């Protein structure tokens, strides 16, 4: 059995496990890409690659969420400062 046949079998198993049997269309491509990435590497070594990629995705999403929160906080703080300055009579035209 070659990698392509294994990929088809695994994709069908995934579709069967999700309960509704729906084939989303990317399972075969995903398994083929994983097989191509793995190459002739042993599964015990490949898990380090996969776990590293999963961790990178997790930390990237967490960083983006934290960045967005900080950006929102900064914008609210910036608006509050401008509002306070305007209430004190500063228009911003005082400085070129």
Image (cartoon, rainbow, N blue to C red):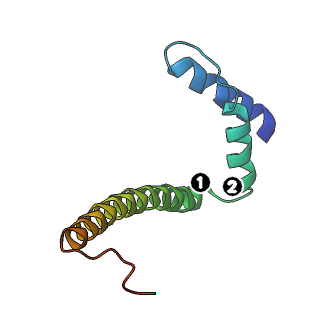
Q: Residues within 10 Å of mark 2 (few under 14, many from 20)?
A: some
Answer yes or no: is residue 1 visible.
no
Front-lying residue, 61 or 57: 61
Q: Are marks 2 and 1 in contact (CB under 8 Å)?
A: yes
* Residue on which disc 1 sits: 43
Q: CA distance from mark 2 to mark 1?
A: 8 Å
Residue 7, image x, y percentages:
72, 35
Helix, strand or loop at label 1? It is helix
Identify which residue is drawn at 68% across, 39% down: 31
The quarter of the displayed image where residue 2 is located: top right
The quarter of the displayed image where residue 11 is located: top right
Q: Is residue 58 above or below residue 80?
A: above
Of the residues tagged 2 and 1, which is closer to the observer? 2
* Residue on which disc 2 sits: 38
Identify which residue is drawn at 58% across, 26% down: 14
Helix, strand or loop at label 2? It is helix
56 left or right, relative to 79: right
Q: Is residue 18 above or below residue 95?
A: above
Identify which residue is drawn at 78% across, 32% down: 5
12 left or right, relative to 70: right
Residue 65, image x, y percentages:
38, 56
Residue 53, image x, y percentages:
54, 59
Answer yes or no: is residue 88 visible.
yes
Residue 85, image x, y percentages:
23, 73
Q: Earlier in the sequence, mark 2 or mark 1?
A: 2
Q: Is residue 46 above or below residue 81?
A: above
Q: Residues within 10 Å of mark 1 (few under 14, many from 20)?
A: few
Question: Which mark, residue 29?
Answer: none
């Amino acid at each position: 059995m070659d990698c392509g046949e294994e990929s088809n079998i695994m994709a069908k198993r995934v579709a069967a496990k999700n309960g509704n049997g729906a084939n989303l269309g990317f399972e075969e491509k995903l398994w083929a890409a994983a097989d191509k990435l793995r190459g002739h590497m042993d599964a015990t070594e490949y898990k380090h690659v996969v776990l590293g990629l999963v961790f990178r995705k997790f930390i990237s999403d967490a960083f983006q969420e934290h960045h967005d929160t900080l950006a929102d906080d900064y914008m609210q703080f910036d608006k509050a400062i401008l509002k306070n300055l305007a209430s004190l009579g500063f228009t911003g035209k005082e400085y070129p």
